[in-house]
Image (spheres, rainbow, N blue to C red):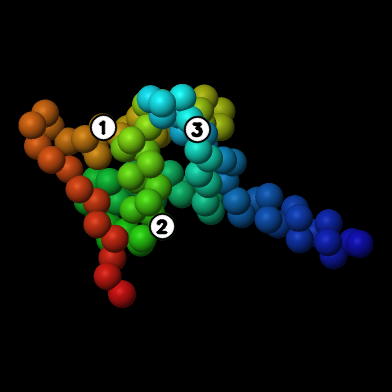
Amino acid sequence: MRLEKRLRALEAKMLANPVILYFADGSKQVIHGPRNFLLDLFVGACGGAEITAAQATHLDLIRQSTHAREPGGARMTELIRIFLHGQAGEPSSVAPVRS
């Protein structure tokens, strides 16, 4: 029992709180990942790092969403969405790393 408590505490530290994405059709979807996963998505959206297939999926969901609810009232998804949409008239694409 004691080991199980320790494992749960460790998992709580390693996993970030979920982010709820809302879409124009009224639906919502939850995304989550390891601690600082939104920061990693931001770097990927800026073109600063290669992204994985899972990150590409998260970025596509963020691009399609209209707004989000993040832990603590943060607005990282809005910053990511800005980089994903790019300048007006410029198409934006996110492609996963090929293995």
Residue at the image point whose x is 34% and y is 45% from the top: 59
What type is the residue that disc 2 sits on? Answer: Ala
> Are there few (<14), some (14-19), or many (20+) residues within 10 Å of tag 3?
some
| Residue sitting farthest toward the right | 1
Q: Is residue 74 visible?
A: no
Image quarter (top left, top right, bottom left or bottom right) of the N terminus: bottom right
Cα–Cα span, label 3 and label 1 = 20 Å
According to the picture, the residue beneath numbered tag 2 turns out to be 54
Choose the circle earlier in sequence order: 3 or 2.
3
User: How far across and down, in percent of the image, does residue 65 sit?
Assistant: 37, 32
User: How far across and down, in percent of the image, does residue 80 sit?
Assistant: 32, 37
What type is the residue that disc 1 sits on? Answer: Ile
Q: Is residue 4 above or below residue 65?
A: below
| Residue sitting farthest toward the left | 89
According to the picture, the residue beneath numbered tag 3 turns out to be 28
According to the picture, the residue beneath numbered tag 1 turns out to be 82
Residue at the image point whose x is 20% and y is 48% from the top: 93
Q: Is residue 67 above or below residue 15?
A: above
